[in-house]
Image (spheres, rainbow, N blue to C red):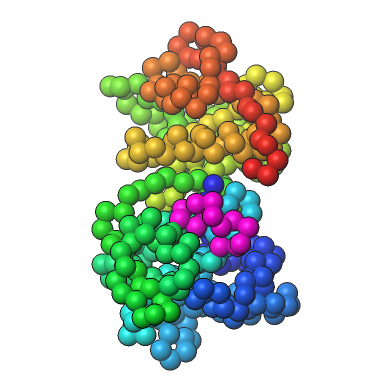
Amino acid sequence: MIYLREANFDDFDAEWSLVRSIPTSEHGFHNAYCHIRREDFDKALYDMVENAQGIELPEGFVPETTLFIWNDLQIIGEARVRHYLNDALREGSGHIAIWIAPQYRGKGIGTEALRRVMEYAEDIIPEAEFYLMTETDNEASLKMMLKNGGRIAGQNGRFTFVRISKPGLPFIPTARPMEKSEYPILNEFLYEAIFVPEGEAPPPRDIIERPELKVYTEGFGSGKADLCLVTELKGRIVGAVWTRIMNDYGHIDDETPSLAISVLPEQRHRGIGTELMKEMLKLLSEQGFGRVSLSVQKANFAVDLYRKVGFEVLSDKGDEYIMICRLEPQPEGE
């Protein structure tokens, strides 16, 4: 799964390792921190954070957010988003610069990463188009831009200038791991996961304090199967899927994680649940689990989603099913 994280101190070592490996200049992407020492990276990170906030910018510079690109749990690239254009950017490098580690090129990752960056930047920049630039002989970079709806706006020999229209960017759901600081949000998604039959009033919000429901979130992060993936839309988490080994409605045994999933009502039927489920099943398999279970009311439309991604009915409990999905081991290198 491809996702973005703003420059931050929680990912210090991963960010440092990546940044020091990026050449000083490659295909128009410039890096001031090539071979930077670990003890000097603190200052570099502070500069990145302050640049995003527009603090003490050098003359002629605009606020710029540094984003790190992740593929599952591996950091693989860096992107920069300039918040608006000045004359130099308008005639030059534009809004977005992106760099992907060589071993991840040629696999479609750069194309997806650029789309994620544009989704992130859509509400930040005021211009109607994204301005991008690439070296004319960098066919892979140009192809990545054109696949994301780009059009060639001009060339000056060495560089090709590309524009990508902002309006109507399609929303393509993606998943990322939930950060520890976000765990309290699970209570909101636990409440939204409660199935309410058509025509019935939703239960009071304090229902999640009942012991049979608190097992889904209380102390989350303490167990080997405590895994959570989320989907964001314009900076807000709109869907979550999480697992843990617990004595819940879908419990089978003490080696099989139970799964819960929830998408905010106004964001349903957009493919978010399917994407979250697929990525969670892949993650569980990578973590060595052989199967995962869940409980679902028969009248819940989500039954079709679960069948679609590989779940089958293990037992019929009257108004509900206990379902399991048998996980295929992931090949090495996946």
Please tell me in which quadrant of the rendered image residue 194 appears.
top left
Residue 28 vertical placement versus 334 (above, below):
below
Residue 304 vertical placement versus 270 (above, below):
above
The span shown in magenta is: 100-112
**Front in this rendered view, residue 285 or 106:** 106
Q: Quadrant of the C terminus?
A: top right
**Residue 214, image x, y percentages:** 57, 33
**Front in this rendered view, residue 78 or 164:** 164
The reply to whether residue 126 is visible in this rendering is: no
The residue at 57%/78% (across/down) is: 25
Please tell me in which quadrant of the rendered image residue 314 appears.
top right
Asked if the stretch drawn in magenta spans residue 111, the answer is yes
Please tell me in which quadrant of the rendered image residue 103 appears.
bottom right
The reply to whether residue 212 is visible in this rendering is: yes
**Residue 265, image x, y percentages:** 35, 37
The residue at 30%/64% (across/down) is: 151
Asked if the stretch drawn in magenta spans residue 289, the answer is no
The residue at 54%/51% (across/down) is: 107
**Residue 29, image x, y percentages:** 52, 74
Q: In the picture provided, is 80 more to the left or to the right than 285?
A: left
**Residue 300, image x, y percentages:** 40, 21
The residue at 67%/62% (across/down) is: 14
Q: In the picture provided, is 103 more to the left or to the right than 197?
A: right
**Front in this rendered view, residue 226 or 65:** 65
Q: In the picture provided, is 284 more to the left or to the right than 134?
A: right
Q: Tell which residue pokes out farthest to the bottom in this image.
A: 59
Label tally: 0
